Image (cartoon, helix red, strand yellow):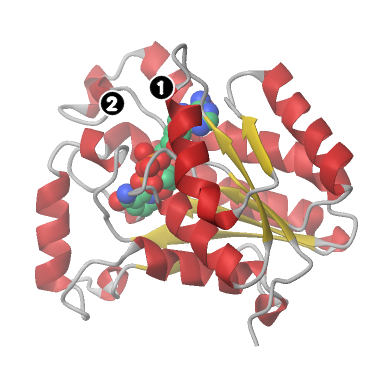
């Protein structure tokens, strides 16, 4: 049975009720996990307010600022997890960012600053958060990140994020190899396109969604809940033999060589 009771799960990347991280947090809570969440702080405190209101039904015992570009904030986050929870079992890395200049047009036009920023937030951050989680996962643990097929094959306009996701998927494997002896598993979920704040920045996201509806074996896109269910499985002991893998939750789109 999928049972996460007694487990502490920290979920990053909730911005609003469309966020994949929100779908994941709900399913982890449903399976019995105690939830903590982070938000990206802004001057007016809007994201914090939104995240606090949205997650209230899950009774999160931690709601913390977590800008992954701010080392002091990341350190403070894990210090608080240690202080309040004592240990950590599940870490969800569900965040990414690339400037618009990297998500449309020609790859050859991507500015260096946009490249560095996207790689820092979307790729480096997985290892950075894993560094914080490692000493707290004293009974083993599960780290899960979110990726997309555009990190494996060329998808129009996904450009910079495709390169960031390729790096992210390789990070999953290096982390899995390093942390496996501590029984910390690291896996990625490659989700099909879903309309969210982040995905709306990718040029032609609606075309990507329509293509999935036409081509994928299930003839539809996936939901945040379906991604959340897979995350709950990967977080649980039911997946105890799985690490370093990228699991596709994409209605089967990835297998369709001829039409992609
Ligand atoms: P979203 O906009 O709801 O979530 C993106 C999150 O990243 C937001 O919560 C935002 O606050 C956070 N973020 C951005 N910069 C940050 C920073 N510096 N520090 C901390 N957090 C920061 O969009 P989403 O689609 O739910 O994206 C979540 C993850 O899922 C991303 O990694 C995305 O690439 C991945 N993904 C999305 C899709 C899709 O079609 N929506 C498909 C596959 C994978």
State the residue position of label 1: 115
Left or right of 154 in this view: 90: right
Q: Quadrant of residue 239?
A: bottom right
Residue drawn at x 42%, y 24% as measured from the top left: 46
- Mark drawn on residue 101: none
Instruction: Answer with the quadrant where ligand 1 appears in the image.
Output: top left
How crowded pointer 1 is (Cα within 10 Å; few <14, some 14-19, many 20+) is rated as some
Left or right of 218 in this view: 11: right
State the residue position of label 2: 102
Quarter of the image with the C terminus is: bottom left
Query: Residue 68: x percent and y percent?
Result: 59, 27
Check the image and report above or below for 224 versus 38. below
Q: Is residue 121 visible?
A: no
Q: Quadrant of residue 47?
A: top left
Label pair 2/1, CB-CB below 8 angstroms: yes
Q: Is residue 51 visible?
A: yes
Q: Please, what secondary structure does the residue beneath circle 1 have?
A: helix
Check the image and report above or below for 141 versus 105. below
Cβ of disc 1 within 8 Å of ligand 1?
no
Q: Please, what secondary structure does the residue beneath circle 2 have?
A: helix
- In depth, the one of 60 and 68 nearer the eye is 60
Residue drawn at x 15%, y 27% as measured from the top left: 105
Query: Residue 99: x percent and y percent?
Result: 32, 22
């Amino acid at each position: 049975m999928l049972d996460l009771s007694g487990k502490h799960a920290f979920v990053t990347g909730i911005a609003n009720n469309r966020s994949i991280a929100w779908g994941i947090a709900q399913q982890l809570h449903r399976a019995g996990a105690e939830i903590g969440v982070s938000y990206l702080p802004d001057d007016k405190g809007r994201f914090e307010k939104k995240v606090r209101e949205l997650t209230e039904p899950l009774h999160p015992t931690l709601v913390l600022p977590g800008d992954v570009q701010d080392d002091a904030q990341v350190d403070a986050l894990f210090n608080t997890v240690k202080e309040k929870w004592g240990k950590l079992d599940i870490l969800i890395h569900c965040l990414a960012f690339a400037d618009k200049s990297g998500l449309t047009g020609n790859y050859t036009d991507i500015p260096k600053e946009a490249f560095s920023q996207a790689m820092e937030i979307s790729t480096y951050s997985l290892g950075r958060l894993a560094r914080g989680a490692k000493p707290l996962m004293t009974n083993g643990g599960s780290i899960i990140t979110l990726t997309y097929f555009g990190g494996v094959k060329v998808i129009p306009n996904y450009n910079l994020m495709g390169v960031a996701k390729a790096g992210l998927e390789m990070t999953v494997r290096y982390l899995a190899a390093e942390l496996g002896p501590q029984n910390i598993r690291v896996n990625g979920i490659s989700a099909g396109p879903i309309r969210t704040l982040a995905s709306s920045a990718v040029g032609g996201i609606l075309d990507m969604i329509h293509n999935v509806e036409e081509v994928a074996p299930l003839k539809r896109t996936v939901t945040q809940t379906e991604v959340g269910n897979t995350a709950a499985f990967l977080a649980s002991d039911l997946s105890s033999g799985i690490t370093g893998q990228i699991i596709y939750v994409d209605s089967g789109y990835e297998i369709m060589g001829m039409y992609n």
